[in-house]
Image (spheres, rainbow, N blue to C red):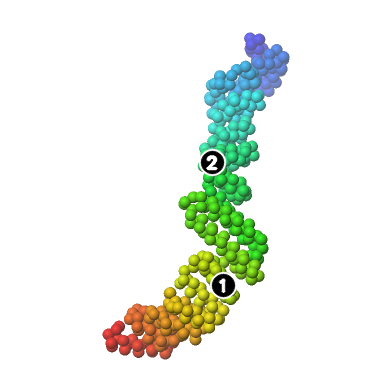
Amino acid sequence: MMQMIGWCICAYLKIIGGQSFGYAYIGFMTILLILQWQRDDYVPILYHFLNCHFRRIHEEVVVMHWACAKITASAAIQDVPLLETLLDKLKLCKGISYAAIAAHADNCGRRKLAALLVDHEPRSSKQVPLLLSIAEEDTALVKATESGDTDLVYLVLFHIWQKRPPLDFFGTINARPLARDLFIKYVRCYKHEFLKDFFLSTGQLQDVAFLLLKESWEIEKNPMASKGTPLHGPRIKLIEKAQNLFAETKEHMFESKAAEEHAKLLRIQHELEVSTKQAIFIDSSISDTIRTCISTGNHRAAMKVRTEFKVPEKRWYWLKALALSTRGDWAALEKFSKEKRPPGGYKPFVEACIGADAKAEALKYIPKLTEPRERSEAYARIGMAKEAADAASQAKDSEFFGRLKLTLGQNAGATSIFDSLRDRLSFQGVY
């Protein structure tokens, strides 16, 4: 048969030797059609001959056609020997698409051969989708992460996510840092519950705790969350769950304690808003909660907060003095100052009065300040230049004395007082 085909070709070319390429091509196709009924196996060979020598088709197209025909005609040959036969020819073409040939092998029912072929495909963008189509997800994930192409990694992630149970999926991506990080980045924005399941499966309890805290903050943003509504119940429970998870690891004991304190404070604030029917406590600090309680006359609640959170005595004096001055309850402030000697001195009372612009009240406490500098500055702040100068002189600090003079420099009388005092002290050898 081959001899007959060769004879026909030679005879035909001799006959049309003087004709154009178009006639030769048409005539040659006619020979193929005549001979096709004799033996179909010879037809691809004749096509390849025709393409290479008449139409100048690219070599890789011809080789691909041959490879696909070879796979179709080699049902009886094992995958590995057939692969070796194919590679002997395919490796000669640099631009050959192994993925296209592998796809043909898969269409022919030879999935293992397809997997072997696609492994030789150098282009990840062609390789990875085909690996997914032939159910080689693990290999596809490896190739995608090795390529560094995040779009390919996401393609594989979403494909595996839909096909596998959560625990299997988590185990697969956790072994691949790039895939794991991209997955976390995606679900952190869109699927918190799934991210919590992932962290739990990998033992990252602290990350679950942080997610719970974030959920509690989302509830905080709800406009109804600051009006004593039941929304605070779930919010507090989320914080308590986070506290328990933090407590599981020694490295996060600080976070555990902070979450515990936060939940306790929220519960007290919620009770205060319910009892006072005023939405003024939720999400304020411990100090602000105490000040608000005193400012509204709820001293018992203020003492409860102080006891629950072990507020230091110095801090308590500051908070109560400022709160009483905010109310303008000067009698209560004076009574408080006389209960016992304040642990930090009388500065909180002075600051509270000056802050409330109560000069007369401030004068009750400024003389009790033990530090000359503090007394001098306090007198200066309420415009009493002579008393400020006298107190400054007791500090025996020329730099401080000069700075205080500049502070009161707009007052001509104050400048005169400072100059006179400086001259007197210089004569005495103090400055």
Locate residue 171: give its quadrant.
top right
User: Where does residue 194 sit, x and y in percent of width and height?
Assistant: 61, 46
Please name the residue shown 38% across and 89% down the image.
417
User: Where does residue 277 sit, x and y in percent of width and height?
Assistant: 66, 70
**Within 10 Å of the Cα at label 2, are there few (<14), some (14-19), or many (20+) other Cα atoms?**
some
Identify which residue, 340 or 324, lies in the foreground: 340
| N-terminal-most mark, 1 or 2 | 2
Q: Is residue 389 left or right of residue 106?
A: left
User: Where does residue 175 sit, x and y in percent of width and height?
Assistant: 52, 39
Q: From this view, report whether residue 328 is shown above or below residue 100.
A: below
Residue at mark 2: 174
Please name the amino acid that badge 1 sits on.
Arg
Please name the residue shown 35% across and 81% down the image.
395
Identify which residue, 38 or 27, lies in the foreground: 38
Please name the residue shown 54% across and 58% down the image.
260
Q: From this view, report whether residue 296 is shown above or below residue 420.
A: above
Q: From this view, report whether residue 9 is shown above or below residue 167.
A: above
Locate residue 144: give its quadrant.
top right
Please name the amino acid that badge 2 sits on.
Asn
Q: Quadrant of the C terminus?
A: bottom left
User: Where does residue 25 sit, x and y in percent of width and height?
Assistant: 67, 21
Q: Is residue 214 visible?
A: no
Q: Is residue 390 visible?
A: yes
The secondary structure type at the circle numbered 1 is: helix
The secondary structure type at the circle numbered 2 is: helix
Identify which residue, 307 or 235, lies in the foreground: 307
Q: From this view, report whether residue 174 is shown above or below residue 277.
A: above
Residue at mark 1: 300
Please name the residue shown 47% across and 69% down the image.
312
Locate residue 327: give its quadrant.
bottom right
Q: Quadrant of the N terminus?
A: top right
